[in-house]
Amino acid sequence: MQRRLVQLFGLFAATLALSGEAVAQRNAVESWDPSSRDFSLGGPSGGSSGADTSRNATLDSLNKILSASQLSALDRSMYLSIRAFQLSRLGREADSQKDIAEMGRVLPSDWQVVMSLAMPSLAGGGDRAAALRILDSALARKPGDPSLMIAQAQVYMQIADFPRALGLLDLALASAKTEGERRSAAFFRGHANFNLGNYTQAADDFNASLEGRPTFKSKITPLLWRYAAQVRARRDARTALAKEIGAESLNEWPGPIVRFLLGKGTSGELEVAAESDEAAKRSNGKCPAAFFIGMDAVRRGDKQKAREQFQLAQARCPTVSEMNWAASSELKRL
């Protein structure tokens, strides 16, 4: 399902481009102080008439897509979630609620999963308040759903409200019924704890999120984050990482990051890989490269290098990226 949702977001990005509305995630150098920006949950965020015109154009495009009878249930549910978001941004809450209800009718078992994957990404365009309103409405229809609470926590972490995110993730983990839900809740709780400076708890959470992952490829991201948390908790992060890696090949991205952290490559070699490797280029590899070069500097006690790299990560990583959140938090502690 997730692969299909990624494809749908690609189509949606094209739709927004045609309508003149940018969906690109804002650059990471924007302010992370929630009090300096309008994140009021009381109603739609303000905007110019030009922005409203653009949103209406986007809405027209979505209406045309949803009028097609050949859409699969999954596709229709995804586009309904996007339209619900756009309607909320326009202040049309009653119509937004209708689309949420229709999602439940079209995809009764998994509509909340679609919603949970859509809202954090859509929030990255800047309107977190609309995403949170949608998720509140979804939770009113499906109280205590772990995937929806995890999505809420992700949006709150985008505005650096890590205490609220942690509370939501505690609830999500307590109510998780499947292994996948437990892994996801533990992974994002690890991020909330990391950004709050609870490094030991973060390392334990990332470790818990490894449980049940069948392949090295599926383990590598939580392993890298466990390394970061263990570095800050003053544990022997490199030895723990080496033990997990064993004889696995590190040629495929993000393997070069692991190779660097294990002392088997230089930061310059990692930067070259981030810029030249095809998989790295597709996934903005320069973002994690900067962040983990910074974490290695923290491990070595080189605060100046760490500061430079975390600032670079802020600039390279979008605000929906866990590495942007972590770089911003770490800069405050250096």
Image (cartoon, grey):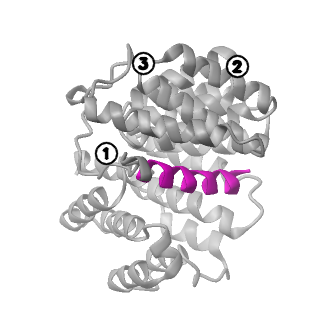
Horizontal and vertical percent position of residue 121: 50, 44
Describe residue 135's horizontal placement relative to residue 286 as left or right.
right
Give the magenta part as a residue range: 1-17
SS state under label 2: loop
Circle 1 sits on which residue?
A: 329
- The residue mark sitting in front, 1 or 3, is 3
Q: Earlier in the sequence, mark 1 or mark 2?
A: 2
SS state under label 3: loop
Identify the main secondary structure in magenta: helix
Horizontal and vertical percent position of residue 33: 24, 34
Q: Please name the residue shown 50% across and 50% down the image.
A: 15
Give the answer, above or below, for where 188 lies relative to 143.
below
Circle 3 sits on which residue?
A: 91
Q: Residues within 10 Å of mark 3 (few under 14, many from 20)?
A: some
CA gap, disc 1 and disc 3: 33 Å
Q: Earlier in the sequence, mark 2 or mark 3?
A: 3
Q: Is residue 261 visible?
A: yes
Asked if the magenta segment contains residue 5, the reply would be yes
Residue type of the residue flagged with mark 3: Gly
Q: Please name the residue shown 39% across and 39% down the image.
A: 158
Circle 2 sits on which residue?
A: 142
| Residue sitting nearer the eye, 10 or 193 | 10
Q: Is residue 201 visible?
A: no
CA gap, disc 2 and disc 3: 23 Å
Marks 2 and 1: in contact by CB < 8 Å? no
